[in-house]
Structure formats: C-alpha cells, structure tokens
Image (spheres, rainbow, N blue to C red):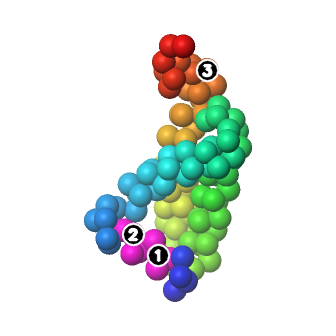
Amino acid sequence: MSDWYEVKLLVEHATGWPMDTLHVMAGVILQLVFATLLRRSLADLRPWGLVLLFELANEAHDLWVERWPSLGMQLGEGLRDLIGTMLLPTLLLLIARTRPRLLAGRR
C-alpha cells in the first residue's frame, strides 16, 4: 500500500468517522484553505478548481492502488467520493456568486 493510502486509513480510524464523512469535510476544508492561501473569495473558481483537482488525483490514486473484484463497483465508489467531496464546495461557490449576503451578512 502507498503512504497516502496509509495516511487516509490512519485518519479514518483515529477519528472513527467513515470515509464518506471525511470526503465531505475535506472538500470544504480544502476549499477554505485554498481560498485563504490564494487570497481569493469563495466566489472565485480557483479554490473550487483546486479541490476538484485534488479529489480527481485522490480517486486516480485509489484506482491505481486498490484492486476491487469488480471494476464497476470501484468506479461507482469513486464517483460517490467525487460527488460527496464536491457537493458542499460547489454549493458554497454558487452561494458566494449568487447570494453573497448569505455568507457575509449586511455591510
């Protein structure tokens, strides 16, 4: 197994949270970290795009490292991870672009 896979297992077992939950949390946390590091708003596509790139790289890694009996099941799991990771960052991006007052309040 790879070091990255071992880190993911460590986090899963240390927190007691299922991997699906960790995907959702990682998506939002990474979007906030990237927005901060890039000094960009959540309305900017760049933080969202970096989350997408990291998630696609993570899923490509999983396909490379893990060997499931059924490729269809493995691809389905990867798609579920992609959707779970990107759902809230996409929602935050859309809200920041269309209804920024929901995030910032009145000025």
Do tag 3 and tag 1 residues touch (Cβ < 8 Å)?
Answer: no
- Residue 25 coordinates in the image, percent (x, y): 44, 51
Which residue shows up at 31% across the image and 71% down it? 14
Task: Examine the rendering and report whether any part of residue 68 can be seen.
Answer: no
**Depth order, front residue of 52/78:** 52
Task: Examine the rendering and report whether any part of residue 105 can be seen.
Answer: yes
- The tally of labels here is 3
Residue type at mark 2? Val
Separation of residues labelled 3 and 1 (CA atoms): 37 Å
Residue marked by disc 1: 7
Residue marked by disc 2: 11
- Residue 24 coordinates in the image, percent (x, y): 45, 50
Residue type at mark 1? Val
Local packing at callout 3 (Cα closer than 10 Å; few below 14, some 14-19, many 20+) is few
Reading the chain from its start, which is encountered first: label 3 or label 1?
A: 1
Q: Secondary structure at mark 2?
A: helix
Q: Secondary structure at mark 3?
A: helix
Residue type at mark 3? Thr
- Residue 54 coordinates in the image, percent (x, y): 63, 59
How would you classify the magenta stretch by its main secondary structure?
A: helix
Separation of residues labelled 3 and 2 (CA atoms): 35 Å
Separation of residues labelled 2 and 1 (CA atoms): 6 Å
Please identify the residue farthest to the left as the structure is shown: 16
- Find out whether residue 53 is within the magenta segment: no
Report the magenta residues as a range: 5-12
Q: Secondary structure at mark 1?
A: helix
Residue 98's label in the rendered image is: 3
Which residue shows up at 34% across the image and 61% down it? 18
